């Protein structure tokens, strides 16, 4: 597996110009850790909803993804966290993280969506995969499920994949799944893979033609000094603009 590719930094003026040409805009946030002792988890959730809502008023978004570790080791925290997320200004989708220690059945009961699910938005598809279990183990995604979905959507223009746990050993808390990279590199319409889990990571790793993007964290007791979220904009020319909101200033802008 070779890491390479083209990541271009943009000035604020360039990003502002590109924003006017976007046809799809979404937000990814992860690692809220609702219920973690010693943290202001209610405030963290209130702030992420407030900050995404403020961003949405200035630059309307189409949907949000909360990419895992919604709660911190407690089934009873999931419903209160969900009620706060319901305050987001647009439709949101979720993945299970290693601290979301609940069954597939309870997850579906709370969120009304299975652990592995797909959403079609015209010529754009999002695939949300599970990378843990009720025990909180670090797992590879269901590659057969992904293969069937990627094949089903091979004629769509853009596919975006969301997995809480990274599938390469970029950090000590990831897992190593070479078969995942072998699978996705065959599909040229995969525009990005998004990971949470690593609170200190807010950058991009390139593998083949695909950017693997991290979004830091909005809760918990470790990681980047800020608690923010990632914005992704699909442009009319089919390029991608992405940046981190930290949470009110734009950083780490890149174009693919």
Image: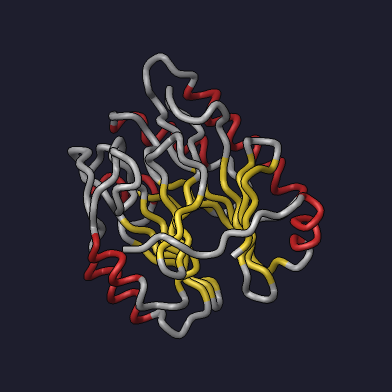
Q: Measured along the vertical axis of the image, is residue 101 above or below residue 1?
A: above
User: Would residue 214 appear left or right of 177 to someone viewing this image?
Assistant: right
Please tell me which residue is depicted at 62% across the width and 74% down the height of the picture. 238
Q: Is residue 141 left or right of residue 230?
A: left
Q: Disc count in the image? A: 0
Query: To which quarter of the image does residue 162 belong?
Result: bottom left
Residue 174 placement (x, y as % from top left): 29, 45
Find residue 136 and report its horizontal and vertical position in percent.
22, 38
The C terminus lies in quadrant: bottom right
Q: Residue at x 51, y 74 (%)?
A: 158
Q: Quadrant of residue 221?
A: top left
Q: Is residue 132 above or below residue 199?
A: below
Q: Position of residue 101 (x, y in %)?
A: 25, 37
Whole-percent x and y of residue 111? 39, 49
Residue at left offset 39%, top offset 39%: 198
Figure check: 255 above or below 33 = below
Residue at (46, 40) in percent of width and height: 201
């Amino acid at each position: 597996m070779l890491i390479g590719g083209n990541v271009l930094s943009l000035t604020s003026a360039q990003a502002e110009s590109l924003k006017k040409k976007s046809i799809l805009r979404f937000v990814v946030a992860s690692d809220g850790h609702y219920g973690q002792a010693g943290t202001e988890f209610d405030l963290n959730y209130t702030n992420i909803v407030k900050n995404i809502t403020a961003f949405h008023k200035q630059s309307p978004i189409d949907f949000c993804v909360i990419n895992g570790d919604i709660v911190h080791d407690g089934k009873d925290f999931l419903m209160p966290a969900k009620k706060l997320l319901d305050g987001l200004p647009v439709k949101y989708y979720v993945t299970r993280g290693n601290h979301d220690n609940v069954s597939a059945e309870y997850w579906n009961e709370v969120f009304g969506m299975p652990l592995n699910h797909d959403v079609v938005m015209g010529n754009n598809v999002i695939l949300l995969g599970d990378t843990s279990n009720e025990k909180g183990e670090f797992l590879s995604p269901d590659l057969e499920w992904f293969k069937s979905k990627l094949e089903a959507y091979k004629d769509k223009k853009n596919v975006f994949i969301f997995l809480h746990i990274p599938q390469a050993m970029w950090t000590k808390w990831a897992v190593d799944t070479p078969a995942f990279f072998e699978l996705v590199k065959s599909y040229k319409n995969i525009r990005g893979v998004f990971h949470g889990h690593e609170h200190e990571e807010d950058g991009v790793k390139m593998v083949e033609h695909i950017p693997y993007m991290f979004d830091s964290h909005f809760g918990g007791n470790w990681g980047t000094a800020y608690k923010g979220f990632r914005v992704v904009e699909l442009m009319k020319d089919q390029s991608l603009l992405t940046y981190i909101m930290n949470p009110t200033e734009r950083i780490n802008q890149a174009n693919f």
